[in-house]
Amino acid sequence: MIYECKEANHSMMFKMLRNGVMRKGIITTKYPRERIVPFDGDKGLPVVSASRCNFCAACAMACPTGAIQIIEQIVELDIGACIFCGACERACDQEALKMSPLVELATKKREGLRMRY
Amino acid sequence: MSAEAHNKMTKQIEIFDSVLYDEEMPGNQGVGRSILDTLLADLPGDVSSVVARSEIERNNMMLHVPKEHFLAFVTALVKIRDLDLVSFHAVDERELHNAYRLYLLFSMAHDTFLTVTTDVDPVEPAFSSITPVVYTANWYEREIKDMLGLVPEGHPDPRPLVLYDTWPEDVHPLRKDFAWNAKVESAYNEYTFRRVEGEGIYEIPVGPVHAGIIEPGHFRFSVAGEPIINLEIRLGYVHKGIEKLSEQMTYDRGVYLAERISGDNTFAHTTAYCQAVEKIAGVTIPDRARYIRTIFLECERLYNLFRDVAGITLVTAFNPGAQMVYSMQEEMMQLNDCMTGSRFLRGAIRIGGMHKDLAPEMCQLVLGKLDGLERDFTIFTEMVTHMSSLLDRTQTTGVITNKIAKDLDFVGPVARASGIDRDVRRDHPYAAYPDLQFDVITKQDGDVQCRYLVKMGEIHQAMRIIRQAIENLPGGAIAIDVDDVPQGKIGFSLVEAPRGEIIHWILSGEKKPYRHKIRDPSFNNWLAMEQAVIGYNGNIVPDFPLINKSMNLSYSGNDL
């Protein structure tokens, strides 16, 4: 009886080892387990349509955190400072700037948070 | 004024016995004047004669009293009238009339307010403390001392309150000569905790970093074995200078700041801010905006209360039940996301109305969702109200007596569970609440079970309000432009947030607030925690998490 028990434990242990319990190094799982389906009105990454934008800087003026800068016909957006309030979208007369439903914006480095359009 | 509008106004007055008037109805000003006259007539002659000047603006009566008579006047006032202290704060008005001004704001019956003001000379920055007569003034006066450097003389506990230990003692951030972005040298100040001494008394320090990586706060328990003898709460670790920041921001930007005062009461804070500014500007927002605001306010209440109920259930170790309610909270937050594009209802409101409209199909979605949630929640309620393992834990735990709740002016569900019948939605109606039917849930015993029942009852009421608001949702515009906000005017607004009443008080400056005072309900109710855990009711250390969950206060809202 005792012997059986031990055997059961052993086989369990081997099963866990095979699955990588004691393995060292990086073990990652696939992300995401299921894809997030955003709602229509979800406020994520602001996206600028370069063909429509006339660089009037209304969005930069409206931004409460100063996340938008316009430098020589380039709209630079600092997502680290963005609070996804949608003030820029409302300020844009040309309908060039839209809040997209993209919310997975993590980057490995801080520079990756600077978007240029 | 049209006959229809006049009828509507008369009806409202009949329903609420309200004295709120607008400029178009001169007769109403008389009602406000007569309330002031009776108030002054009830005071002893030598006390009422010290009032230097009085004025009435809307439903707020302002009485100016010289500093030397301030304490005597307030003492006489609270003796004759049942007043709730709403706010006590100071403004650096040295640029305007070379003095600091104290504003003591009381809420009275019939949707009226009373503000007692007094001037403090900058040469002698001190005033006599009113804490011995108005107990609630305790933390407010300590805050005034920290932020403006006005010393409340005779205060029983003059230790620092809001600023962190490394903040130098003689720097007061809300003074106008302190630049908002100034850097200060670190100082070292020792904060002394109250000591309980005796044989077998031990202290248990908990925090400021907590196990759940929640917000920071320090709890110092003095215990004799398991029973708690005393608890002292030290907060201020996340003081962000919101009031000072707000003075630098134009009103439209201030909305985004108000959204971030307390993360889960976003919509209530922004509504209070917008209403205060709208009051200064003297605008009336469209009816549709009023109704949509009400719907969102109640949606916010729903997800907050679901989380609170789930939290209490979890701490009593009834995990499956807690997960049921947590899933309802998640459904509510996804509904918020669907309606506004933000799970916390951010970016939906603006001064003068709303940014987000509610489409008819969205209304149907909300109604369908509410039906499902109410069905599930009713099953849950029936299950837990008769569950002996849960009742053992919640009944007679963390009792706050009615007297303590009244003396310290606790607010929100905490106060209502102790038998205080106060709800700003009914007593100082705003948004669409005057047009809607709902009950204010009160319980008498003041223990965790009562707070649990009040919160569960409020969930049903919130659903009732949303259904009515959607049913009667008027058409039309959702916003009007507010361009001109006059200077030097006072506007304030009370909003019943899920935790209790929020006050935003604004003295307007040039396109920005000259002074913006915010009071979150947690500022009042942290003292309730100190009272509730004391062991003469048999509370022991393991009861603390349960009592804490039953109130679920905000650190961020307290540490402005």
Image (cartoon, coloured by chain):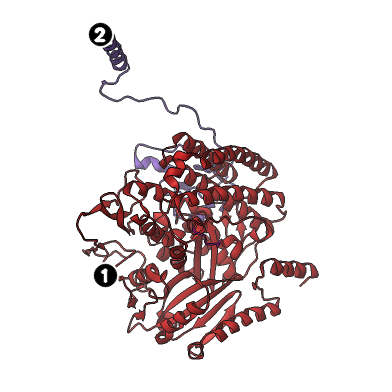
**Quadrant containing the N terminus of chain B in the rendered view:** bottom right
Image spot of residue A19 (x, y percent): 32, 17
Assign the magenta stretch its main secondary structure.
loop
Q: Quadrant of the C terminus of chain B?
A: bottom left
| Residues marked 2 and 1, same chain | no
Q: Residues within 10 Å of mark 2 (few under 14, many from 20)?
A: few
Q: Quadrant of residue B440?
A: bottom right
From the image, state the color of chain B. Answer: red
In percent of width and height, residue A72 lies at 45, 50
Q: Is residue B300 above or below residue A40?
A: below
Question: Disc 2 residue type?
Answer: Tyr
- Residue type (three-letter) at the residue carrying disc 1: Glu
The residue pinned by badge 2 equals A3
- Pinpoint residue B458: horizontal percent, then vertical percent: 57, 51
Which chain contains the residue that carries disc 1?
B
Q: How far apart are labels 2 and 1 at the CA level?
A: 73 Å
Residues rendered magenta in the picture: B418-422
